[in-house]
Image (cartoon, rainbow, N blue to C red):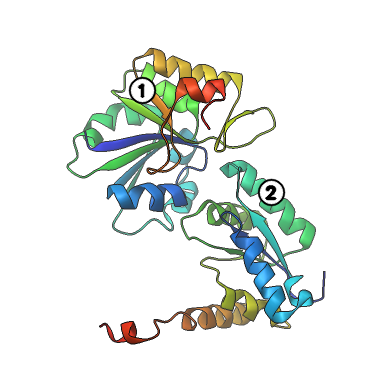
Amino acid sequence: MAIEVYRIDDRLIHGQVVVGWAQPLELEFIVLVDDEVAASAWEQDLYRMGVPCEMRVFFESVESALTRLPEYQQMTQPGLLLTGDTETMRALVERGAAIPRVNIGGVHHRAERVPRLRYVFLTPEEEADLLAILARGVEVTAQDLPAATLVPLADVLSGHGE
Amino acid sequence: MSDGPRAIVAAHGNLAAGLVSAVACIAGDAAAARLLPLSNATLGGAELAEALRQAVLSAGAQVVFTDLPAGSCTIAARRVARDVPGLAVVCGANLPLLLSFAVASHKSAATLSEAVDKARAAMLVAGEAANGD
């Protein structure tokens, strides 16, 4: 499959994605799935800025991503699919997207979230989203950068990931 | 905080605090007091934008310096700049850039452009490698 990484990251496109993952994996495109960003030219310009010109960025809503995902998965270049939250990734998986594994890359501190890893803080609803994805046979692990330790979801939720 | 233009330095990890500390060492505490460091550590995109917005408003900052063009700090700064008239965002901050800004008596577009020019000029390859050997 051309999409090497399916990542949940509430910063969306940022340094870890563009430098930390894209350079060692030689990624050539990013598919950003977010209904709000997909509906706003300003948001798209914001995220496109700073991405190297040789890297393509595609903006999709959940609906359009479900239609176009097979095309992205058949591209000859390696790429990364990105959602900003667990709910969006769960929607993709439960609505039939062929996603083999999910990378929890960054869900950061917020008042109602419980710390699980240095870069993962989750609400009960977000934990339920991740467990629902796992229940569909998808491998769910946390890993902020390629060289970091891969932490299985069970260890993330038990607080024994670090 | 001292008189003169004020700025937020927003960066990854401890970089912003380190840069401001270095400005204090070189140009003095009064110059460094124009710069308020902010780290993106543990903050999601929305939380970082809100923290930056609060920092800009409370400091009366006219400029946000960020480290990486595609980084979360720059994304957040551009969001804030959309709502704060006159707020400038300068990416790729380094020590020469911050020193130029911190010792300038007035902030203007020309001052910022000059500071960026100096920062660019300060980057060079020294020694034999400069000849491509």
Quadrant location of the C terminus of chain B in the rendered image:
bottom left
Q: Position of residue B123 (x, y in %)?
A: 46, 79
Callout 2: 10 Å neighbours few (<14), some, many (20+)? some
Residue B3 visible in the current orientation:
yes
On screen, residue B34 above or below A43: below
Q: Can you identify the residue that label 1 sits on?
A: A139
Name the residue: 62% across, 68% down. B19
Q: Position of residue B83 (x, y in %)?
A: 65, 54
Q: Position of residue B35 (x, y in %)?
A: 71, 68
Query: Of the residues shown, which amino acid type is indicated by label 2?
Result: Ala
Letter of the chain that mark 1 sits on in the rendering: A
Query: Of the residues shown, which amino acid type is indicated by label 1?
Result: Glu
Q: Which one is in front in this view, the residue at disc 2 or the one at disc 1?
A: 1
- Decide if residue A69 is on the left or right side of residue A112: left
On screen, residue A161 above or below B15: above
Q: Marks 2 and 1: CB-CB under 8 Å? A: no
Name the residue: 32% across, 86% down. B128
Q: Can you identify the residue that label 2 sits on?
A: B51
Callout 2 and callout 1 share a chain: no
Name the residue: 70% across, 76% down. B25
On screen, residue B103 above or below A125: below
Callout 1: 10 Å neighbours few (<14), some, many (20+)? some
